[in-house]
Amino acid sequence: MPSTTPTARAELGAFGTLASAASAFALGVRRNFANWPVLMGRALFYLVAMAVLSALWDKVAAQRLSGTLASALPQGGLTLYVGATEWIALSIAAIHLRLEDDIRLGMLEPHLLRPKPYLVQKIAETLGDSLARLFGIGAAALIALALSGRAGPPLAAFLYVAVLGLLAVTVGVLLMTLTGLAAFWVRRVLPPYLIMQKSIFLLGGLFAPISLYPGWFYRFAMWTPFPADLFLAGNQMIAPSAATFAVSAMIQILWIAILSGLVALVWHAGLRKVLREGV
Amino acid sequence: MAIVSVENLRKDYRYVRRKPGLARLFSRDIQTIQAVDGISFQIAERERVAIIGPNGAGKSTTLKMLSGILEPTSGAAQVLGFVPWKQRRALAYRIGVVFGQRSQLWAELPARDSFALLRRIYDVDRITFERRRSQLVERFGLGALLDQPVQRLSLGQRMRCEIVASLLHGPALLFLDEPTIGLDITAKAAIRDFIREHAGAEGQTVVLTSHDTRDIELVCDRVIVINEGRIVVDQPTDQLRRLFLGHRLVTLRSAAAGIELSLPGVTRRTTEPHLSIFEVDTRVTRVDVVVQAALALGGIEDITIEDPPMEEVVRAIYDANGAR
Amino acid sequence: MFSTYAANIAAAIRTSLMDRTNFILNSAGMVLNDVFFLVLWYMFFAGFRQVGGWGLHDVALLLGLTMLVVAISGVFFGGYRDMAATILRGEIDALLTQPKTVLARLLARESIATAWGDLVMGIWMLVTFAALSWRDLPLVLLGLTCGTAVYVSSAVVYASLAFWFAGARSFARDLTDFMLLFSSYPGSIYSGMSKVVAYTLLPAGFVVLTPVAMLRAPSWTTLAILLASSLCYAAIAIVAFHLGLRRYRRGMVPAG
């Protein structure tokens, strides 16, 4: 007799979802480390990008041209800041491409036939993937920093950046999830992706902290979720403080909540469309 | 108690057909395709049912509605006591689904890891899971394959893994959508045997769609034929064969180069040297009469009496239907 | 030999332009991408005025030249991009049995559609923001020719790694990307190790930095360096490729 105990399963409910999300998360981590040549490639890309960007910012800092923003720069220049933002940016796994594939190629079907929510699994898996990248690229970053003989920030800053970095990557994954869900309605995810990516770079301050922007632009950017993705974490590398750390963490958690709600809404709208019209 | 009961199920797909030129800006022509046009049937516990039909007939659409991933336009259905599209998750625990053309395993991972993940997804306790997995793996001979990434397996090996994956949570009802498509004869045979024996042993109900008539013949005891969204035939497999053709094939292997049989209702099909195949219209002449006549000629080395291949049966049904 | 090449690449160009929607989508994306980075540089120079003697016009010149080098390479030598993968898939076997040079055939077999977008952007960049005059045109063309030679040669060397190890499939693309990365920032920032890299392994120095120097401050020395470097890199590429090809013909399989 097939064993089916629906009542027992109903009790598992949220716990069951959490457990399967946890194994999806672990899967994401494991897969990344199993594919370690790719991870090394990413770390290498990070190091090359940092070599170029640090050359740029060091030069700017060294010049100290009067009447320019150079006076607003921290002592060591922006290399540490960009080191943190690039670390986060390169760690966010491309969930939007996986969603595009699943949605457009009808690969949602097997997932819809399972008793666990597809998107929760997918996001958990991507977070695991991103965590593994944070680890790999972070290790490379720390080694490079040590070898470069550059003066680093106080130890506390590393702790702050680590925590905010984790939250930042979560924000980033949620933003990319929204981008990927566009696949329910548009044919190619590439245009929304480019818009999202550029918004993150510009309003999130990938190359320079948004605090250097003109006042109105800075205030405008702070109303968007993008600083929660990059700037807030990166800022701890150049101006670490427990107070700003706490505030930043709260802002990030708030955005995670808002974006999660948004993702849930968009997903349900898309799901309804698929259930009505077929995959 | 019916495990599956379907009443007047209907599914329309709507799409917009654009008019050429400027007319496009002013009006949209909405076309409706009736994929499923009011079908009704019931399936009892332990039945093994095949749903067949030409491409676009509505088989996959029906299966999707019964598994909850598609909402019907109108009509009702109950599967294992659940309304599929309303209680999709609850139903998911109790059904197993295999798509012939789509994988549900994680491609870069070994099958073993996919199974472990599925255990979590279906909330199967460890002991039950491990027992069931070892039984299935042994029965299907998958031992050596479990640790290879799924994408490196051949199609036949992958399909066996897919089927095992769909059975790990002990479902009461199995939906199989083209499970043997693209496989070689050995692989097909393995899968058919497995489904038949395992389903029988576990008391599972099986609903299968296929283009391969041997799937139907060897696995299922009932056939539902769908054409243009409607059920055309719903019969036990044997009856279907007999009703629709009332023919049997008699193959004779002889010492002589050819054989002559002139009996009413007996037509020669093909002849190769020493091999003659006759089609017997059993409504006109009984098979034993034909056999006796053949034996009377002497020099018969071998006789085979069989039903015509399901392909012909199905073709006959489509043709009969098309003419309507 | 030139006419065969021309015929091959013309066919490749026709093929690349056949998928209109994809082409427009990708080109538009690239244009927006480039405009975006231009905006970033504008903001940078608004805030910092100059870096190592380079101002917005100089960066515009740099970016314009880079885009044009990528454009010309992509349209006329597009096979460079996937050469490592082609080698690893064993697709050169067919070419080896034919009478023409393998390397030329490999370069001519594909033309990258989106490179046309880079072409448009590059020209616009040079004309509008780079503070050039019409007198500079000959030097621009010379710079582009030499820069393209170095760029394509380097790409060929990276791709030739595929004869030695299979990881080259993605690594070759990475190296080309790194070279472009180095080519997108003012040359004045490089010093020490990074400068060495920029003038040897990832020769952004010879692809665009020297042409820029030649346009801003023309001199016979810079011209000589430019010509010498392009001949040098072309020679290295041909040697590297043929060494690899010889290895391939001997039946040696790439590691990994």
Image (spheres, coloured by chain):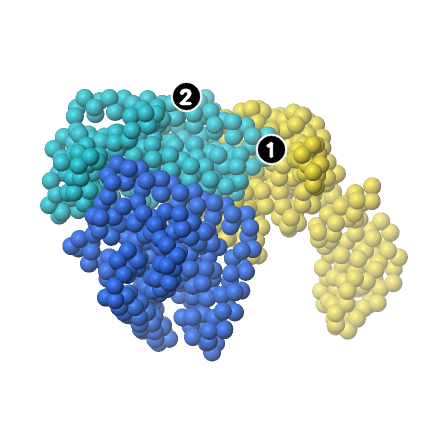
Chain colours: A cyan, B yellow, C blue
Q: Which of B284 and A154 is in front in this view?
A: A154
Q: In this view, does A3 lie above or below B144?
A: above
Q: Residue at x 40, y 65 (%)?
A: C87
Q: Which residue is drawn at 58% across and 50% down?
A: B181
Query: Which secondary structure, mark 1?
Result: helix
Residue C245: image location, x then y, percent: 36, 73
Q: Residue at x 44, y 22 (%)?
A: A10
Q: Which residue is drawn at 35% across and 58% down?
A: C136
Mark 2 is on which residue type?
Glu
Disc with the residue nearer the chain's start (1 vs 2)? 2
Q: Considering the image in quadrants, where does the C terminus of chain C appear?
A: bottom left
Q: In which quarter of the image is residue B25?
A: top right
Describe residue C155's horizontal placement relative to residue A104 as left or right: left
Residue C89 is tagged as none
Question: What chain is tagged by disc 2?
Answer: A
Residue B178: image location, x then y, percent: 59, 45
Mark 1 is on which residue type?
Glu
Query: Which secondary structure, mark 2?
Result: helix
Q: In this view, does A193 lie above or below C115?
A: above
Whether residue B224 can be seen here = no
- List the residue tagged with mark 2: A11
Residue B182: image location, x then y, percent: 57, 53
Residue A277 is tagged as 1
Q: Is residue B218 above or below residue A24?
A: below
Residue C174: image location, x then y, percent: 32, 54
Q: Is residue A154 above or below residue A15?
A: below
Q: Which of C98 and B116 is in front in this view?
A: C98
Question: What chain is tagged by disc 1?
Answer: A
